[in-house]
Image (tube, rainbow, N blue to C red):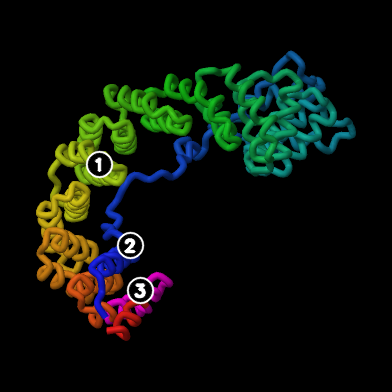
Amino acid sequence: MTLRPTFFLSLAFGLSAISGPAQPEDVGGMSAAEIDLASFLDSTVGDPDVDPASIINESMNFRKEREPDMTAAEFALYERISSMVETNPTFALQLLETMLGDDDEDSAAFDLALGNLYFAEQRIDEALERYRSAVAKYPEFLRGWNNIGMIHYQRQEWREAATAFAKAVNLGDRDAQTFGLLAFSMRQTGNTLGAEMAFMQAMTANPEDPNWVGGLLELYFSNGRYQQSESLVHEMVRLEPNNPRNWMLYASLLVTLERPLEAATQLEIARQLGVADRESLGLLGDLYVRLGLVPEAISAYQAIPGGADELGVARLTAYARSLIGQGQLTEAQGVLDQLPVVAQWTQVKAHRFAQAELARAQQDWPAARDAYDGILQTEPLNPHALLGLGHSLAQDGDIARAQFVFESALQVSASERRASLELANLALTNRNFGEALNYLQRADAVETSAAIRSQIARLKAIAEDT
């Protein structure tokens, strides 16, 4: 039986479609993972930086307005021992406890004083009992509610703390710290709406404290309210312009809002101010790559202290490869021509794979061959380089050497199937159907597919007819 040449071609091209183009290994690139904006906030954001002991100790100083009065006897005793309260609280506690046996009920003010001394002696349960006694006798006792809140806050009993601080606020406490403590406690209980309002009140009372801004930001991020977050992030940068994490936060938010040019502008400002860290410069370079500003990207990467060249080459090489995949060959060539020289083999290899891809896209087979050869000199069994070199040689007409390279690739498990298909194509071109059938069966043994089995059946039918 005589076969027409067109049949050989259709069969060979069918095998190429089955095998697919040789793809280089993943050698690094830009990640498209979603940015976690909350990760740029401090882990204790919104948590008031307070010392419960100092807050409670301050309440030892009695006030005249909106405060319960001690009895004359209590006040006389307290005046006598007030000088020793801070220096010798143990002795002061013993003196005050002598009054507990009296028939008269202790006043709310005396309960607070005694509770403070119990707290100083780390007798926390007794302190809390006295504070509760104080507010039970005098429900508008502001300092009593604050002290109750501080003990629960210290114990991380958030619901009880929130209740106490809310009572203090309702009684007229307008201190930013109290609002902040209330906000943090509410946030811990899941009352995000109440926490939001309390953080806003804390910001109003003390607009220069970044802690309250950060607490509110965390709530917004957790609810995906990114548009509303922008003014708060801008405020964080204003309050702490020397903190590089604030600049990263601002830029990352703008990226999330799909405004990469503005994000790059903010990071460039941070860079010019000298507050951009490694992370900021890396993101700046990535943004410039995304915007197609290659010289600016290289400049940003090179400004990263320690290992900047490797980072820049990896990301710019990935960008060049994406341009090649999109058919933007001139742009890809421009990127590759501007890459800085590096010594790290991983990045050198990535660069050579990109050069090989570009040469293949341009059908410049000698250039592709040279690029693959450069990889194989260091990694003689690299499966992607072997397959790429064999393909380039075959396209350039050097069939004998192409067959030798594919046979080498046949010995590497990662490239065995693809090499079998390439060798089957070469055998078909030479009308060696038996050899082509053997290679196809070997490829099918590695990984079977309906397309390969169909080609095997066709070749067997041809063999029978001949």
Which label is found at residue 316?
1
- The N terminus appears in which quarter of the rendering? bottom left
Q: Which amino acid does label 2 sit on?
A: Ala
SS category of the residue bearing label 2: helix
Where residue 267 appears, x then y in whole percent?
34, 27
Most frequent secondary structure within the magenta stretch = helix
Q: How far apart are marks 3 and 1 (CA)?
A: 41 Å
Tag 3 residue: 455
* Nearest-to-viewer mark from 3 and 1: 3
Q: What residue type is labelled 3?
A: Gln
* Nearest-to-viewer mark from 3 and 2: 3
Q: Is residue 155 above or below residue 393?
A: above
Nearest to N terminus: mark 3 or mark 2: 2
Which label is found at residue 17?
2
Nearest to N terminus: mark 3 or mark 1: 1
Q: Closer to the camera, 330 or 93?
A: 330
Q: What residue type is labelled 1?
A: Leu
Where residue 460 appears, x then y in whole percent?
33, 82
